[in-house]
Image: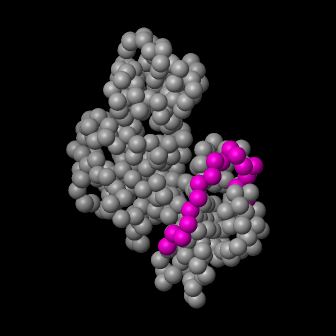
C-alpha cells in the first residue's frame, strides 16, 4: 500500500452483518474519501470484531477515525447485533485503535449515508417518479430486514435509524392471511423480517409447499434445499423457471416487499424517494422489474396517487454501507 500523503488521513470503515463483515480502508484528502482496499470476512469464523480489525490492519496503518455500521440497534455506544453473538462497543474499539473518533451506527444508517456518495450508475430505477422535496426512506432485505429514514432539514437529508423491519406483518390477501397463520403457529410474533429476508423467502416457500396448493416439491429440489442455502436455491430455480413452487414463492416475496416499501413511504412521507438496499434486491432485479413490486407499492387505496409519484430506486452497489460508514467517519473529523 502506498504511504500516506501529506495532509491526508486514513479512515477505517466497516459493514457488520450477520453473515459477513466487510472492512475498508479509505484515504481522506481534500474532503473526499477514496477507498484503498476492502476485504470481506465470514463473521461466524471470528470471536469478535476486534479480532477482524487486527487481522485487517495487521498493525501497519495509523487510523485517524473509524465508523462501523452494525445490523441492529445502537444503544449508548454499544451495538445490539441481531444476528451475531458479538459484543461491540465504541469504548473497546477506541482503545484498540488508540483514537477518540470511533462511531457505531446502525447498518441502514450507514447505507443511507452511502446514498449521497454513490453515482447514478449505482442505482436502478423501478419508478422514475417526480422530483419532490421532503423525506426519503430506505428498506433493505438481506440476512434480516432493515429500515432507515432520511429526514429533510436545511442541510439536506439526515439519516435516522429505525427498527421497522420488526413491525407486525400485515396481510393483504387470503393467501397472505393463511401465510400469517402458518408463521404464527411457528414463531408467535410475525414481523416483516420473517418474510423479507433470506430465511423469510424460505419461510414463504415452506408455507406454499406445506399447503399443497401449488404442487408437490420435486425430490431433486428437496435435496438441494437440505444441502444448500434455501434462498439461493429458490431464487435460482425461479429464474430458470424449473419449479412452480419457487416461482410462486418469489412472486409472493416481491409482492410483500413492494407493499412494505409503500407502507414505509406513507409512514414517513418519503416524497423524495424510496431506496431498496440489501443483498437480495440486486440478485432478483429482473423479477423486480416485472411490475409486481410496483403494483404492491402503489396499491394504497385513497393515497395511491401520492405513492405513484414517489421515485423508487434499487441500490446496486454492494459497498454502499461501507462507503456510507466512511463518509460518517470523515464527518467526525470535520466536527
Give the total of numbered labels: 0
User: Would residue 235 appear left or right of 193 to someone viewing this image?
Assistant: left
- Residue situated in front as seen by the camera: 187 or 286: 286
Image quarter of the C terminus: bottom right
Can you name the residue that lies furthest to the bottom here?
A: 6
Q: Is residue 335 visible?
A: no
Residue 50 picture location, percent across and down: 73, 59
Residue at left 50%, top 74%?
A: 33
| Residue 234 image offset from top left, x and y in percent | 44, 29
Pick whichever, 148 or 120, lies toward us: 120
Q: Residue at x 47, y 18 (%)?
A: 220
Q: Determine whether 206 is above or below 258 in the image.
A: above
Q: In the rendered image, which quarter contains the N terminus? A: bottom right
Q: Residue at x 43, y 50 (%)?
A: 277
Query: In the shown orientation, is residue 77 left or right of residue 8?
Result: right
Horizontal and vertical percent position of residue 102: 66, 68
Is residue 35 magenta-colored? Answer: yes
Task: Give whichever of 287, 259 is nearer the camera.
Answer: 287
Q: Is residue 169 left or right of residue 76?
A: left
Residue 296 location (% of width, % of height): 31, 35
- Viewer can see residue 132: yes
Whether residue 28 is in magenta: the answer is no
Q: Image height check: is 144 above or below 229?
A: below
**Colouring used for the render:** one colour
Q: Is residue 217 above or below residue 301?
A: above
At 63% from the left and 73% from the top, the residue drawn is: 65
Magenta extent:
34-50
Amino acid at each position: 500500500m502506498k504511504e500516506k500523503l501529506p495532509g491526508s488521513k486514513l479512515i477505517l470503515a466497516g459493514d457488520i452483518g450477520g453473515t459477513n463483515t466487510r472492512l475498508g480502508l479509505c484515504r481522506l484528502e481534500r474532503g473526499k474519501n477514496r477507498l484503498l482496499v476492502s476485504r470481506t470476512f465470514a463473521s461466524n469464523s471470528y470471536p469478535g470484531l476486534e479480532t477482524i480489525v487486527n487481522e485487517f490492519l495487521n498493525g501497519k496503518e495509523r487510523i485517524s477515525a473509524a465508523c462501523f455500521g452494525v445490523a441492529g440497534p445502537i444503544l449508548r455506544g454499544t451495538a445490539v447485533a441481531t444476528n451475531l453473538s458479538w459484543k461491540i462497543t465504541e469504548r473497546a474499539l477506541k482503545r484498540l485503535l488508540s483514537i477518540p473518533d470511533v462511531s457505531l451506527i446502525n447498518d441502514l444508517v450507514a447505507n443511507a449515508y452511502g446514498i449521497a456518495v454513490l453515482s447514478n450508475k449505482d442505482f436502478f430505477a423501478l419508478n422514475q417518479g417526480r422530483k419532490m422535496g421532503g423525506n426519503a426512506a430506505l428498506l433493505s432485505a438481506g440476512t434480516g430486514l432493515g429500515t432507515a429514514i432520511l429526514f429533510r432539514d436545511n442541510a439536506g437529508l439526515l439519516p435516522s435509524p429505525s427498527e421497522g423491519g420488526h413491525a407486525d406483518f400485515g396481510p393483504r390477501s387470503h393467501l397472505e392471511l393463511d401465510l400469517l397463520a402458518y408463521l404464527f403457529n411457528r414463531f408467535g410474533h410475525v414481523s416483516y423480517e420473517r418474510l423479507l429476508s433470506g430465511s423469510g423467502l424460505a419461510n414463504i416457500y415452506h408455507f406454499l409447499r406445506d399447503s399443497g396448493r401449488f404442487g408437490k416439491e420435486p425430490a431433486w429440489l428437496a435435496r438441494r434445499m437440505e444441502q444448500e442455502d434455501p434462498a439461493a436455491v429458490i431464487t435460482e430455480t425461479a429464474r430458470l423457471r424449473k419449479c412452480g413452487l419457487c416461482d410462486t414463492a418469489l412472486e409472493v416475496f416481491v409482492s410483500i416487499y413492494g407493499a412494505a416499501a409503500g407502507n414505509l413511504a406513507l409512514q414517513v412521507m418519503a416524497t423524495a424517494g424510496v431506496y431498496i438496499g440489501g443483498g437480495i434486491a440486486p440478485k432478483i432485479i429482473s423479477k423486480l422489474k416485472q411490475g409486481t413490486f410496483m403494483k404492491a407499492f402503489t396499491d394504497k387505496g385513497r393515497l395511491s396517487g401520492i405513492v405513484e409519484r414517489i421515485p423508487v430506486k434499487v441500490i446496486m452497489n454492494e459497498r454502499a454501507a461501507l462507503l456510507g460508514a466512511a463518509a460518517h467517519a470523515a464527518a467526525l473529523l470535520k466536527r
